[in-house]
Image (spheres, helix red, strand yellow):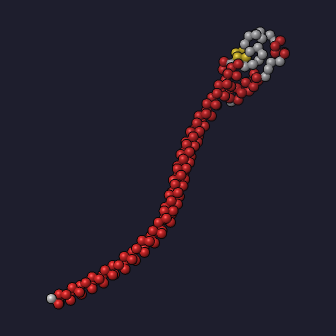
Amino acid sequence: MDGDSGIARDEADAIPPSDDAAAAPGPSPSSAEEGDGGTTRDPEGNWEGAVATAQRMVAAMGDAMRGEFRLPKMEYQLLGRMNRLAADKYADMADFAAGLGVFVESLRGKERALAPLGKHIDGLESQIEALEAVVDRLDKYAARLETRVRAMY
């Protein structure tokens, strides 16, 4: 497989050169060796291209992870705003309910203050009913007197 042989070759290249390799004839240690994919090895055996590729890979992974978490982050921000709105609405409802409680208590106080007047009004109504009965009797008596007076003349 091509992928496996590339990995094995990269692993073999990652092994630092031994002292024997430095004494071997060939290019001088100060010259850079060219490898696959444009990677170069400096005199100490570091792979500059591999580091750059790894940095690009880590940056790409970071971008991918940020992209993956962008939508859930937005959803949580939306949920947070919705929760704050709901909390504000519940706070308004609690204030309204507290206001209603105060209003009900004030109405009960007014009812207690007006209760004696209601009893007084009930007493007046009974007196008025009694007066109406007296007026009715007087009207009937006046009518009888009127008929007597007419009968006399």
Which quadrant of the figure has residue 33? top right
Q: Can residue 36 be seen?
A: no
Q: Quadrant of the C terminus?
A: bottom left
Query: Residue placed at 74% from the left, 10% from the top?
Result: 31
Residue 25 spot, x, y in % from top left: 80, 10
Q: In terms of depth relative to the viewer, which is nearer, 66 or 89?
A: 89
Residue 51 spot, x, y in % from top left: 70, 22
Looking at this rendering, what residue extends furthest in the bottom direction?
152
Residue 140 spot, x, y in % from top left: 27, 84
- Seen in the picture, residue 143 relative to 55 is either above or below; the reply is below
In the picture, measured across the screen, residue 27 lies left or right of residue 90, that is right
Query: Residue placed at 66% from the left, 28% from the top?
Result: 58
Q: Quadrant of the N terminus?
A: top right
Q: Can residue 65 be seen?
A: yes
Residue 26 spot, x, y in % from top left: 77, 10
Looking at this rendering, what residue extends furthest in the left direction?
153
In the picture, measured across the screen, residue 8 lies left or right of residue 122, that is right
Query: Residue placed at 58% from the left, 36% from the top?
Result: 70
Marks counted in the figure total 0
Q: In terms of depth relative to the viewer, which is nearer, 125 or 17?
A: 125
Which quadrant of the figure has residue 134? bottom left
Q: In terms of depth relative to the viewer, which is nearer, 73 or 40?
A: 73
- Seen in the picture, residue 9 relative to 105 is either above or below; the reply is above
Query: Residue placed at 53% from the left, 57% from the top?
Result: 102
- Seen in the picture, residue 143 relative to 4 is either above or below; the reply is below
